[in-house]
Amino acid sequence: MPRSRAGCPTRAKDVSYVMTTTGGDRLLKATLPTTEAPATCEPVKPTTTPGKPALEASWFPKGTSDRAAYRCDSYYAYTGGHTLCAWRQDEDWISSNKTATRN
């Protein structure tokens, strides 16, 4: 299935997205064609403690960091039914860019 950079399938519907222009913080909410997380997402390691999203939006659920179940590229995410909620923190964006420039 084709996907966007955040691991969100390109066939997703009702996509809401907010970002900062001065860093890597992002929020994403989308309706997926299935109830499963995108294939590119991996389960969050039990030793990982995701940080809270730095951004807020009226459409993005509160308390998301407690529900993080997946890592989709540099995003933390969880699914609820057909809904995918994902967020990225500036620190993760910086880290992923450093890794990309080394390769």
Image (tube, rainbow, N blue to C red):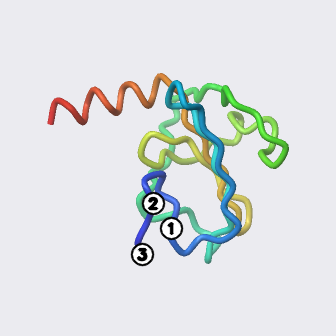
Q: Quadrant of the N terminus?
A: bottom left
| Other residues around mark 2 within 10 Å, as few (<14) / some (14–19) / many (≥20) | few
| Of labels 2 and 3, the one closer to you | 2
Q: Is residue 11 above or below residue 101?
A: below
Q: Which mark is residue 62?
A: none
Q: Residue at x 35, y 33 (%)?
A: 96
Cβ–Cβ under 8 Å for marks 2 and 1: yes
The image quadrant of residue 34 is: bottom right
Q: Position of residue 77 (x, y in %)?
A: 59, 47
Cβ–Cβ under 8 Å for marks 2 and 3: no
Mark 2 element type:
loop
Q: Is residue 11 above or below residue 48?
A: below
> The disc labelled 1 sits on which kind of residue?
Pro
Q: Position of residue 46 (x, y in %)?
A: 52, 35
The residue where tag 1 is placed is 9
Alpha carbon distance from label 2 to label 1: 6 Å
The residue where tag 2 is placed is 4
Cβ–Cβ under 8 Å for marks 1 and 3: yes
Q: Position of residue 21 (x, y in %)?
A: 55, 31
| First along the sequence among labels 2 and 1 | 2
| First along the sequence among labels 1 and 3 | 3
Mark 1 element type:
loop
> The disc labelled 2 sits on which kind of residue?
Ser
Viewer-side residue, 73 vs 101: 101
The image quadrant of residue 36 is: bottom right
Furthest toward the left, the residue is 103
